[in-house]
Structures are given as C-alpha cells and as structure tokens.
Image: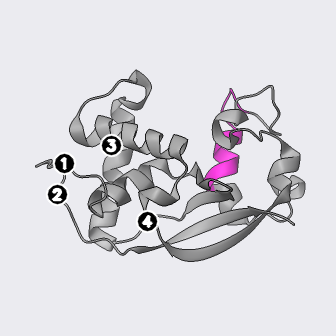
Amino acid sequence: MDIQKDLPHTPKEIIDAWLEPVAWRDDFGWPPTEYNAWHYELGDNPSLAYLASLRWTKQEMALSPDMIIRHDMDRVRDLFQAHVVGVSFSPSISKPEYHDQFRQHIDHLSAHGAFIHPVILEEVDAGLHILDGYYRLCAYFYLGGYLQVENTEIRSAKVDPQQQVWLGKQAS
C-alpha cells in the first residue's frame, strides 16, 4: 500500500494522521472504492480519483458549528450527548475507549488551547465536511462555549479560537 504514490498532492501529515490508519482497518482497505467502507469517511465520493483531486492547505481558522455541514454537526452533537451529557442513542460512540479519546482532546485543549493535531476538513458547497477530527471538534465546540451544558467533571477552559486545520478543496 503506497498511499503517497496514489495521492501525490496529499501532504504526508494527512496520510499519516488519517488515511493510513483508516486504510489498515479491516473494513476499509486501500484504495477507496464504492464497495468498501470509505463512504463512511468520504461521504458521496468514496473514490481514489476524488481524493486525488483534492488540493490541501494548512491554515489557521476560527471554527464555528454553522461552518460545518449539517450531517457532520449532527454527529458532533451526538458525541457531545454521549461524552458530556451522558446520554447516547448509539452504542458504538459510547464505548469507554471513545470516552477516553474524547477526554484526551478535552485535556489537551484545556492545557494548550489548541488541537493535538489539525482537523482535516473538506470544503464543499454546503460548508465544511469533517474528514478527520470529530472528537477534536466536539471538545473544541464544548470548551469554546458553542455546545452548552454544565458538566462538573469537564470544566470549561479558554481555547484559542484560531486553530490549525487542513483544508481540502476540489482542484479546478
């Protein structure tokens, strides 16, 4: 599997942080096709050709929930309900290891004010599609005051509104 060869315009940081770990999962594999689980990550365009057409920039951005496409923001809210409110309608996101992952992002953002590593977003007509970083964004939106509920175990903290992100755009 040589993802960098297949996606020469994709930065190594994106491959290392997102594509390679996902590609090694049993239900995904490489390359993305309509027949494997990549549609969970890529939405309507689960193909190598589509991924290859994205051009990436690393930039600082002040993120808000209204910038995120509705489907993805619904998933962030589901994570919030599961890991902050303590109510979940999906057993798959309520696993203890996922709560630990969420807490790791809360702790890092609280201590440093910034993501552990940049979220990976795609610019689409409706807004920003989250490719990688749902838990980081849930923690960011909670600590930033966008998702409000008092949880005595998770104290609010000051986070920098400007966060580093990778932004993918369709090549023209």
| SS of the residue under disc 1 | loop
The residue indicated by pointer 3 is: 80
Quarter that holds the C terminus: bottom right
Going by the numbered disc 2, the residue's amino acid type is Arg
| Residue 54 x/y as whole percent | 79, 60
Q: Residues within 10 Å of mark 4 (few under 14, many from 20)?
A: many
3 or 4: tag closer to the N-terminus: 3
Amino acid under label 3?
A: Phe
Q: Which residue is mark 1?
A: 149
Query: 155 or 65, which is in the foreground?
Result: 65
Q: Earlier in the sequence, mark 4 or mark 2?
A: 4
Query: Which residue is under mark 4?
Result: 115
Which color scheme did the rendering employ for the protein?
Answer: one colour
Write the start and end of the magenta stretch as one range. Answer: 17-28
Measure the C-alpha gap from mark 2 to mark 1.
10 Å
From the viewer's perspective, is 61 left or right of 32? left
Q: Which mark is residue 155?
A: 2
Q: Nearer the viewer, mark 3 or mark 2?
A: 3
Could you say where residue 29 lies in the image, as x and y percent from the top left? 76, 34
